[in-house]
Amino acid sequence: MQKRVFAHTLYAIFIISIAVFVLPIAGMQIASAQETDRFDRLDSDRDASDRSDRGDRGDREDHGMIEVSRERVIGPFRDFSADICARLIQVNERLQVEIPLPLFCNDEEEPPEQDMGHIVISEVYYDVDGEHGSEGANEWVELYNPTGVPVNIGGWSIGDSASGALLPGEIVIPAGGVVLLTQGEGLEILWPEISESVEIIVLGSPINTGGLSNSGDALFLRNPSADLVDSVSWGTNTDAFDPSVLGVGNGESIERVNPDIDTDTSVDWTSNSNPTPGVPGALQQS
């Protein structure tokens, strides 16, 4: 950031130097040529076409001003030099120069960039209906990688405490990809719409102690150093969010509205009456 500001500062100094030292000379040369031309015209008997041509150039002669301007470039620095941005500078009585200062002026604050450099929990199916198996064994959690690089989550844990279910082996989520975590086998049979490209991780044990509670529960995703990566809580549980994500009915899921935004609050989430395992942000796309 400091290098960019320094570079644009040099740019502004360069433009101002041209305005102060070079353009005045050009202005005087033009003015001198105009004065000479005017006196030559007084001594000569021009025809009508010459007088018409002289009249066409009368604006420059009468106003005696060179205007140099460019469209200003809007950038992220609101107050850095707002007092001089796009100011019309009076170099002398015949010359005005409007100097743009790229990336220095901004009438409105730009929204802060959202830090999405981590894996997120993007959908949770905790209240299993009869069509899709049974409670505990066929609950599932969707993890999404919003970053631009593959992320290995092998050795991470997920659960309602620091000692959650351990993710086995090497599990690499590609950039923009997802994985599904579940306790038991057969998720791809219960949900045939799951793409073959989506990896399903069978944990062999409940994601949370006793499974995911329908009335209220929480999930904490941690890396091998036990650092919290992402979390969510719903219903009566406020361990991750307060207020928590509203609970859903049987056969529904909670889903992150925009999988590329994480504000660590319940506003990131909504209910999905038609769960979409393996498709993060499906509600936003519909």
Image (tube, rainbow, N blue to C red):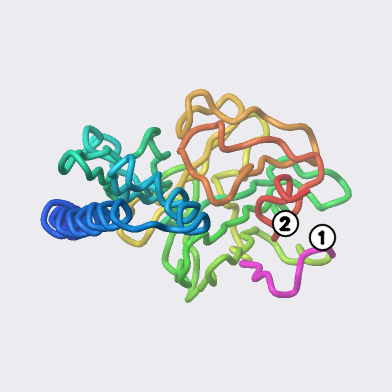
Q: Position of residue 260 (x, y in %)?
A: 54, 51
Badge 1 or badge 2: first in the primary sequence: 1
Front one among 107 and 98? 98
Disc 1 residue type (three-letter): Trp
**Position of 200 relative to 124 (above/below):** below
Q: Position of residue 60 (x, y in %)?
A: 35, 47
Q: Position of residue 111 (x, y in %)?
A: 42, 39
What residue appears at the point 50 percent right and 48 percent down from the top-left corner?
159
What residue appears at the point 48 percent right and 75 percent down from the top-left corner?
169
- Report which quarter residue 216 is drawn in: top right
Front one among 53 and 224? 53
Q: Are marks 1 and 2 in contact (CB under 8 Å)?
A: yes
Cα distance between the residues tagged 1 and 2: 8 Å
Q: Position of residue 51 (x, y in %)?
A: 46, 52
Magenta run includes residue 232 = no
Q: Name the element at disc 1.
A: loop
Magenta span: helix, strand or loop, mainly?
loop
Q: Residues within 10 Å of mark 1 (few under 14, many from 20)?
A: some
- Horizontal placement of 21 versus 272: left or right? left
Magenta segment range?
Answer: 190-201
Q: Residues within 10 Å of mark 2 (few under 14, many from 20)?
A: many
Residue bearing the label numbered 1:
191
